[in-house]
Amino acid sequence: AATTHPYYHSSYALAYVKGRGKGLDGVRNLDDVLALAPEQRGKLRFGVFTASPLTDWLLQNDLMNQVDWYQIQSGDAEQYPGEIIERDLASGKIDLAFVWGPIAGYFARTTRSAPIVAVPLQSRPGMKLDFDIAMGVRHADKAFRQRIDNLISTNQGKINAILEEYGVPLLDQQGQQLHTSQRSDKP
């Protein structure tokens, strides 16, 4: 497939429950997690999807034995990507979730059982965490692709407003957050 121009740029996020007393309030990046006292960090349970780009970071920092794994797509209608936040993070089964940012942002915004904070993560050398999202069209459909690209360009502000309403962390091409009005990114 040929891709259209990206219509948004987002990243993986870390999510936690604000005020739970696990030392996570104020955590804004991966280095903040590592800066926690070893005894505090050693008690944390991490929720991570299989095939996550954060797996290497967890392995490098000797945190793999603290991970609860989640399947990306199980085929079970009762299991869905947001359950890691909506159910398990909110209930305290896990303390910190590493999730694709649009999922984290949406459930941080909509889950009412706990005050969830979703923090977009920045890529680092050897660990790509932010990605452009575009649509795919058949290579031969050049006119259709151009039409979609024009619609994206013309409506980018409206697209961003809808994504922000749903809590999607929006980043610029350098990985810096575009919008800060979201509840989900404020501790």
Image: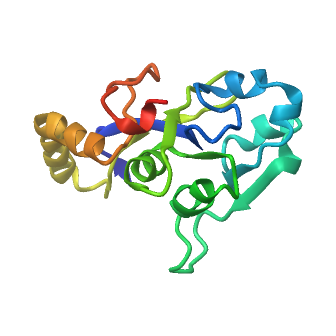
Left or right, residue 25 beside residue 158: right
Quadrant of residue 151 within the rendered picture: top left
Q: Is residue 61 visible?
A: no
Judged from this view, the residue extending furthest toward the left is 154
- Image quarter for residue 60? top right
The image shows a total of numbered marks equal to: 0
Colour basis: rainbow
Q: Quadrant of residue 125?
A: top right
Residue 172 can be seen, yes or no: yes
Left or right of residue 107, residue 19 in this image: right
Q: Nearer the viewer, residue 92 or 120?
A: 92
Q: Which residue appears at 83% of the width and 48% of the height?
A: 66
Q: Is residue 139 above or below residue 165?
A: below
Residue at point 85% right, 46% down? Answer: 64
Left or right, 148 with respect to 106, comes to left
* Image quadrant occupied by the N terminus: bottom left
Query: Percent position (x, y) of residue 53?
Result: 67, 42
* 103 and 15: which is toward the camera: 15
Q: Position of residue 58 (x, y in %)?
A: 79, 39
State the residue in front, 67 or 117: 117
Q: Residue at x 30, y 29 (%)?
A: 181
Q: Where does the image place residue 158, in percent across and percent down from the top left?
A: 15, 40
Q: Residue at x 86, y 38 (%)?
A: 42
